[in-house]
Amino acid sequence: MKRRGFLRGTAGIGAVGTAGIAGLAGCLERLGFEEESAWANPPLVENRPDAVYLPASREEMGTYGTATDGDYAAALSYTFPHRFWTVEATSEGKTLVEVDADDSLHLMVSVWDRETHTALPATLRLEVSQDGEPVDTGTSAPWPMISQRMGFHYGDNVQLPGEGAYTVRVTVTPVTGINRTGSFEGRLESPGSLEINFEYARSDIHDLSFETIPEDRRGSREALSLMSHGGDGGGDGNGGHNGGAGQPPMGRGVPVEDLPGQVFEPQRSGDATFAALVSDADRFTDGSSYLAISPRTPYNDIVLPFTSLSAAVEGSGSVRQNELVEALDHEIGHHYGVAIDGLAAGDRVTVSVDSPPQVSRHDGYETAFFDFDELSYTV
């Protein structure tokens, strides 16, 4: 089903006046009111659990193109403008971002390391230009986000002055605020600058498919499947170029069965799954033990970056407090880790989440990953 058709159908359920407006969508388009009649949020599930849940709809996404620069690769994708929730360390809870009538599309950027094909938690800036002149899109710093269809990415609703050819320059800051070990050591220390050309046409947005979830399933404790970039992602789309980057990763954590070291049984808290392990690999420590915690979403295993964790180690009659540091490793993937001296068999490790993931969330994730209980592991 196309988004435009869905909006016409749902409008008829309400007041007669609203139905009349929806029925005139084609006329409004010819008068220049296309966005006002078509850009509307799908239903929001009522009585949502404080957990991951199945939203009311499933949307298709298209891909404009990819590019590479040094260690970095990026892909530019798009879908309908739609609501999301931002989460910031300086405020409690979350803030709803509604669709504006002037929003042209929801623009999404995936950035990853070319060598390991790992999604990168970084800081991005977007510059949109047309015919060499900068365009004010309403945003220059896309939000780090998680969605059930796109996994971990960066995105925002953007406003374009009209249809036509555009260029997006994605600037990636060096990934130096995160510990890097193994294949990441000594890399990702320079900024990246990647350009992707695309052709914006309103019809491409309207023609994306839109499916409603049956009412008896909405709000259930499950998640939509991740999109397939080889299929309903739309391929190389509307004139974007492929810089030899390949398909973007979704930001999934390393499967628990593939993690190295002493791997503990995963635990759930705040509806996140926490994989944990202890490793004695030399690249992590100088004779100490390395504790690694990998929080991720349930069902799809999407990593949860920009989180603060700490660990208390109880053993030999003492309790040692440790702050975990966000890290990337070629075997463990994205995680939070710390070297602990004298960690011995029988020690009890208690992990606390000091601040929730500072990532924006789409429908289905906005009620989860806020309130966490402590997690305990015995070495």
Image (spheres, rainbow, N blue to C red):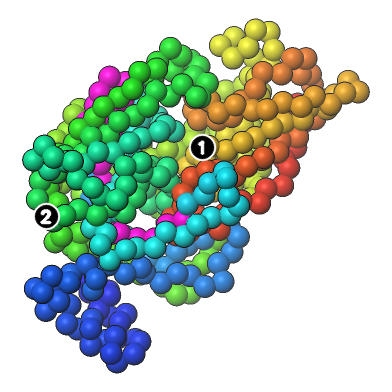
Using the rendered image of the protein, determine whether residue 124 is visible from the camera's viewpoint: yes
SS type, badge 2 = loop
Numbered disc total: 2
Tell me which amino acid carries mark 2: Glu
Q: Secondary structure at mark 1?
A: loop
Q: Is residue 247 magenta?
A: no
- Depth check: give the residue in front, 118 or 370: 370
| Magenta-highlighted residues | 67-85
- Numbered tag placed on residue 201 in the rendering: none
Task: Give the residue drawn at x 24%, y 71%.
Answer: 36
The quadrant of the picture occupied by the N terminus is bottom left
The residue beneath circle 2 is 163
Can you tell which mark lies on residue 305? 1
Does the segment drawn in magenta span residue 71?
yes
**Image side of residue 304 versus residue 337, left or right:** left
| Image location (x, y in percent) of residue 305 | 51, 37
Q: Is residue 160 above or below residue 301?
A: below
User: Badge 1: how crowded within 10 Å, few (<14), some, or many (20+)?
Assistant: many
Q: Amino acid at mark 1?
A: Pro
Q: Nearer the viewer, residue 83 or 249?
A: 83
Image position, residue 358 (x, y; %) = 52, 43
Measured along the vertical axis of the image, is residue 280 above or below residue 314?
A: above
Q: Residue 147: where, in percent of width, then height?
A: 42, 51
